[in-house]
Amino acid sequence: IKTIGSISVQQVRRLQIAIIEQSQAIMGKRKKKTKSAAAAASAAARGIVGPDYCQLLSGTLSSKAVSIILCGESHEDAIDVTRAGGIAKEGWIQTSVVDLTAELVGTAGYGGENVSLRARCGICKRKDKSLPLGKAKEWAKGIVEGEIGYLDHGHELALLFVPSKDAGGTKGRSYVVELFLDELDHDDACAANGDRSRSQLPPDVTALLDDMIRVCDNLQDAKSLACAVEKMFISTSGNVIDNGSGNGSAVLLQWADLDTEARTLNHRRLLGEDIATSEHDKLISDRTKKRQEEENIWTWDEWLIDVRSKLQQESDAPSLHVVLEASIPPWEVELCRDLQPDFELSPAADCIRCLSEDSAESELDEHDPAADGFGAYVDYIYRRLMDGQAHDSRCNYLHCVDSRDLGCEHACVAESLHNDWMNLLQPEEKEQLLGTGH
């Protein structure tokens, strides 16, 4: 469980009070009450989620009173910033063998690769006493809370509940298992060691692993995990575990996100589904409005836009500018060509793409469904503010300063900028590019 944004509501309100005081100082003490001060006072009553920290710097620059608000951001996912209370909560969620295995395949990055996979079990703990499902969840939760911090990336904790016939199905055998996938090693010695480890597992757990292996085989070479999973659910219930006793009522639960919208979105990402930015951003916008209405919690972008709109209503209000660590927009870019006689002219698109991309992913990013190039909160802010920006060379309020993303085809994801990027091309280059269907 983590808190999204380490800055507290109290810290935000103290910062906003300081901003109010600074705004009043900038505009002069002769005005007892102004619309801009009232707007800042109204904003100070809200909780804000988004930045990891905020710091206010005040002083003079070129004989002008200036305030700089530094907002730290640690690449949080936009879906996380819009959680209820700004907090992620996890618990037991019923899943299927197909869904769980497909998530493991997607998380490990095996989707579409021609590799032989095997399901493995790390931790395996069994409750000696038969329990109802509700009590089994409570018992398993205690184990998870002690083990979750030591879990390797790409591993999942699951609860396998197998109802007992002699208890009328109300009680059953309970297992907490750590599940993960690895490539099948064809070395005989390694295979023998793997067999010995399986022989020490309860039959119910080995049956689960066998089912997962069958799913892996069906997903092998699949161009789309999402399509392959859908086809498998058409032909099977996806949740029947053959435990050797003819009892197909076993229940599989995954320790997962309790936020249904966030869990569904991340599941689709892990399966490699192509999600339109418009669909993603509408979901974030709807969740943002819900947080405002139900909890009076505002995301940083909503707070910024609201305060700026009220400041614009006053002619003598302080001017507000935003400097964002995001890709420089196309109208602030020039393509300089070397006109030396022996210099071979490169197409404009190649000039942009030859720039080095952003730094390599960390191990954590490799297993994070949000590392898809558009799901981070700062990317959402970029698209949100850029959609309202005048696309010309005038000095507007939004200034983007990250030149690294100019070479990354997936980082500048803002549909409203497509034509502006195309306008950088010469007519013959644009015709050639459009002719290839890119």
Image (spheres, rainbow, N blue to C red):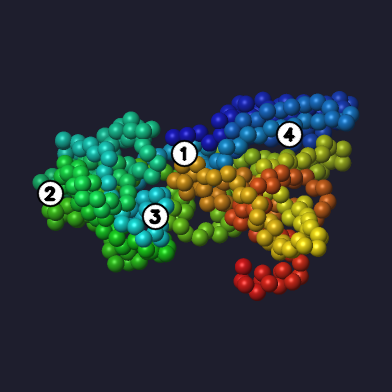
Report, in whole angstroms, how far the alpha carbon at label 2 lies from the one at label 3.
Answer: 39 Å
Mark 4, Cα crowd under 10 Å, few <14 / some 14-19 / many 20+, is many
Numbered tag placed on residue 110 in the rendering: 3
Instruction: Compute the Cα span from label 2 to label 4.
Output: 65 Å
Badge 3, how many Cα within 10 Å: few under 14, some, many 20+? many
Q: Nearer the viewer, mark 4 or mark 3?
A: 3
What's the mark number on residue 24?
none
Picture quadrant of residue 145: top left
Give the amino acid type for the residue marked by disc 4 in the picture.
Ala
Report the residue marked by disc 2.
165
- In the picture, the quarter occupied by the C terminus is bottom right
From the top left corner, tell me how far across and down residue 277 is, in percent: 58, 57
- Residue extending furthest toward the bottom: 435
Could you give the CA–CA distance between mark 2 and mark 1, rounded to whole angstroms? 37 Å
Q: Is the N terminus in the top left, top right, bottom left or bottom right quadrant?
A: top left
390 or 40, nearer to the observer: 390
| Number of the front mark, 1 or 3 | 3
Query: Looking at the rendered structure, which numbered label has been put on residue 40?
Result: 4
Secondary-structure class at tag 4: helix
State which tag comes first along the sequence, 2 or 4: 4
In the rendering, at what x and y percent does residue 396 appear? 80, 48
CB-based contact (under 8 Å), mark 4 and mark 1: no
Q: Nearer the viewer, mark 2 or mark 3?
A: 3
Q: Nearer the viewer, residue 424 or 99?
A: 424
Q: Residues within 10 Å of mark 2 (few under 14, many from 20)?
A: few
Q: Amino acid at mark 1?
A: Ala
Using the numbered discs, state the Cα–Cα distance from disc 1 to disc 3 in whole angstroms.
Answer: 27 Å
Given contact means CB atoms under 8 Å apart, are the residues at marks 2 and 1 in contact? no
Q: 187 left or right of 246?
A: right
